[in-house]
Amino acid sequence: MSRSGLRSSDSETEASNSTIKPLEPQLSRNSSKATSSNLRQSPKATLSSPYASQKSPPHPQPQSTSSPSPFPTSTPLARPSLRGFESSSVTSSTASPSTTCDQVIRDIIVRSFAPRVAVCASTDTEEFLKYKGFKDGLCGLVRPYGERLQGKVVIRDSIGGSKAWDDFGIRFVDFEQLQLPKARQSTLETSVSSTRGQVSGFSDEPDAHGSSPGPDLNTALDRVLNRYLSTKNEDANSTWGGYLDRGCRLAESSPNVSPLYYHYLRKLVSNAVLVPHETFCHPVTCLIAVSSHHPTPIEALRQLYASTGPGSDRVPTWMSTEYLRYYVLIHDEEHDDIVKSTALFDLMKRHFGLHCHLLRLRASQCVPSDDDSARIPSCEWRSAEEELNDIRPRASINDTEIAEAYIHESDAIAVRAFLREMVTQSIVPFMENRMMTWNDQVASRRRGLSGRFMSLSKRWAGFSSSKNATSGSAAATISSGSNYDHRQCFYPLETPEATMRQLGDYAFMLRDWKLAFSTYDFLRADFSHDKAWAYQAAANEMAAIASLLVPPHFNSKPRSDTVDQMLNNASYSYLARCSIPKNVVRCVTLTMELLQNRDYGALDDATRWGARLLEMNLLTPLERTLVSERLADCYASCKSVALPIPRGRKRQAALWNVLASGCWIRLDRWSHAQHRLQLASDLYFMNEQSATGSSFIITQPLWQKLDNAVKNRSLERPSALLDLGQGISSEQSFHQESEQLNSFPDSSQISYANTDGFTSQDITRPDATNLYDT
Amino acid sequence: MSYYFSIIGTRDQPLFELEFGTSKQGGDGVARFNQDARHLNPFIVNSSLDFVDELQWTNNQMYFVVPYLRFRSLSRCRYLKRVDQFASSYVSTFLTPTSTRFMLLHLPHPPNTAPQSTPSPNSFPPFVPYTSNPSSTTTGGNRSSSSSSTSIPNNPTSPQTEEAIRQFFNEVFEIWTKAIMSPFCNIEEKLGSPVFKQRVAAAGKKYL
């Protein structure tokens, strides 16, 4: 029993070395990240190059400290030398890698919920901008600049504190394109040839859950991701270089996660479809623009205002039209008189109030060879359908054409200043005002004692009347106390529930997560009582996300249970009652990411939800691969906080790496598969020649098959991956591996135990018997 | 219920592997794993070792006191119950005093029938939402009726099942200690004895 004695003493030394522990995980992650980054940038490079370029061999083992508890005879001698290497690589890195990766994902999630601004421009404005070279008009001009505002934006939250954010952004959407989901679906069908795009909302389309056997394999999202994958392999100076450069920039900062995953995450949350149960996409402001070319600008502005009001047919009944109107006068520098425009601008201010701006633009189109040309940043937040629409015309353009448009520097400065002024002086105060009003009038009333009595009495009224309900009008009688319109599936605008939902969303967009969470929490019960399932699912989803974004003040144990419950409710409602599987994917993915960002205990929850997402059978193969990869990375980068855990979740990470590699093979992406297999083999200690115990992997037929497939880069059919009845001609790999196996004294027993270990299910094991014939 | 039993040494190497099926309720004792997923079993068991490592320290504080251990070695055998779950397969563990782990992976399905799986197209491990996990509410999806019965083959988390598994482990532990007493048998090497295999299979038939 001496071995046990050794182990316990090791645990004591572990206790004393606990201070070293936090550093170690970063060291190992640094090495593995550097590997993956090198490999990503040159997928065709051989495996030897990433390791040659690094100072230290990619060794995951240094994560554990001085106590090799399950490995009493493994390399304590080798470790000090490795640690010397690792520390040098730490000093070369700029920031701690784990926090960068988590930060990036958290930033993506936080920034994805941004206020929407609808752009309603007069026709002469649109023509002016088209002449300038923006085929999308004013929306196309301001959209890239709006996504990331210059400077810090100070936001006051409901309790009076203020916080400055430097990554605030807004999203612009054309007012003409604010369509109902059905109309949107028809445009999708014309523009994108798949019949089932990324539309969430009314369940007119056949859902993936009930009717069809699996997920829709042809979604726009899938095609965009496939497009990324195929273009990433091209040279960096192709026309797609600029297109993907943001992703690559991200990759350099945090190479632990593949850049494809970031794109996938962004596309998941960039959904521009209007639905009643989520008010994130409802515009917060409407930008009404007229140019100095127009003969009667004030009249034009009045008409545009009317078209954005409640009487317009563009606006669905459940969308509030009480948003801020912001008026812009676009002055043409080269053709019009500035004095006239200034006078007009003063007139506008007198008529319409202070939310006005005069934007001075040059009329000529800019070419890159101009002196003061500046490149327009590409839009980061575009939904998959938009990207596909964009890609298709570009594919037909010559390679020498420029992928990006250019603009004059003065114009860029003017637009940036305009947006900054609009956001900081008009939009944010407006939203804060609305929030305060709603909070005081509606929410506190509901939350107060009288409000609770009101809601309780509504429920009891519903119960008593439902006893007399007939089946036909059951909905009407059950909801006699509620405001929900069952037939059209929305809450009318004046109801407190709709207002509170908007309050929650505004609070979320202004990053006051505590208020958002309390609002959503309150609404969950109301919606489920009213049987407003889409609303209830959305409220549960947002409550889960908000609760995870609130900075933790106490331990997360109680919170993880509530998060689980909320996610369960949300996913069940979305899947079974509303048939919106895309939303399930979105909410589970976001929650998984946020859980992973938290402390150690939540990592298990995160991965559990990730595995459940895979089981739910909602993902396309590529998405499934990305999620498996992400799970592998989660496990590999887990920070082992608790003392006695020697290695965290390395084996789980290895398992998921193997699964991800298999998925990549099925998708014919050999470099990715090879990379994953390499990571798995690192984790299984195959590179360490002195480890005698962990070589069982080599003898596993699955591993051999994967290895051969990746080495030969060929597979006759994907199902052959796991079909071992097929004879594998893999003599060369066995020769390689037989050298390793010969160092084990018990190798002769391997085949014996294995062939006897399996019962009547017949497996031909040519591998094992061939091995020892040579 | 199909079982995959494995004995894992201290360096994660499998010392013994056996697949068998349930003999209760008219089962014929033949393991019926999904052909695709069957080769994944050793990997799943290996990955559950992470949880075993964690649980073995957090469960029993006795471990940190050195002198007592040598005298109380027998009491340190611990049945760690259900350690992990991977896509409807459950893994239970028994820990011996020498840190040799007995791992049992069980996949519930009605006896003498293959586990139904709905493999999604192009998925590498077919993620099988076969039975609903009884301890948590899952989303809609195939809810099989097998969780209603408390019989051992069908319900992997019932107390009867856990008791049966515990008894199986204890019996195997006794067989194993007798097997490793042989001077030709190294505790860290593969157990190739056919007698051992027979006895383990018999224990499986008896309890499971």
Image (tube, rainbow, N blue to C red):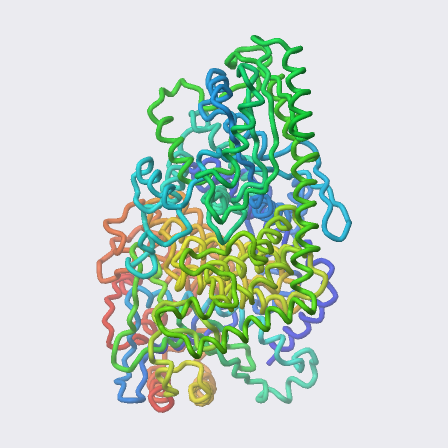
Identify the residue shown where x is 22% and y is 58%: A727
- Name the image quarter holding the C terminus of chain A: bottom left
Q: Is residue A333 left or right of residue A42?
A: right
| Position above or below: A285 against A460 | above
- Residue A324: x and y, percent? 61, 38
In the picture, the quarter occupied by the N terminus of chain A is bottom right
The x, y position of residue A581, in whole percent, is 40, 56
Residue A303 image point, x, y percent: 52, 28
Q: How many marks?
A: 0
Q: Quadrant of residue A45?
A: top left
Question: Which residue does the image show at 32% across and 78% down from the upper left?
Answer: B109
Name the image quarter holding residue A185: top left
Q: In the figure, is residue B127 to the left or right of A505?
A: left
Please state which of residues A205 and A153 is positioned toward the viewer in this rendering. Answer: A205
Residue depicted at x 67% and y 40%:
A428
Above-or-below relation of A203 to A169? below
Q: Tell me where residue A584 appears, x and y as whole percent.
A: 45, 57
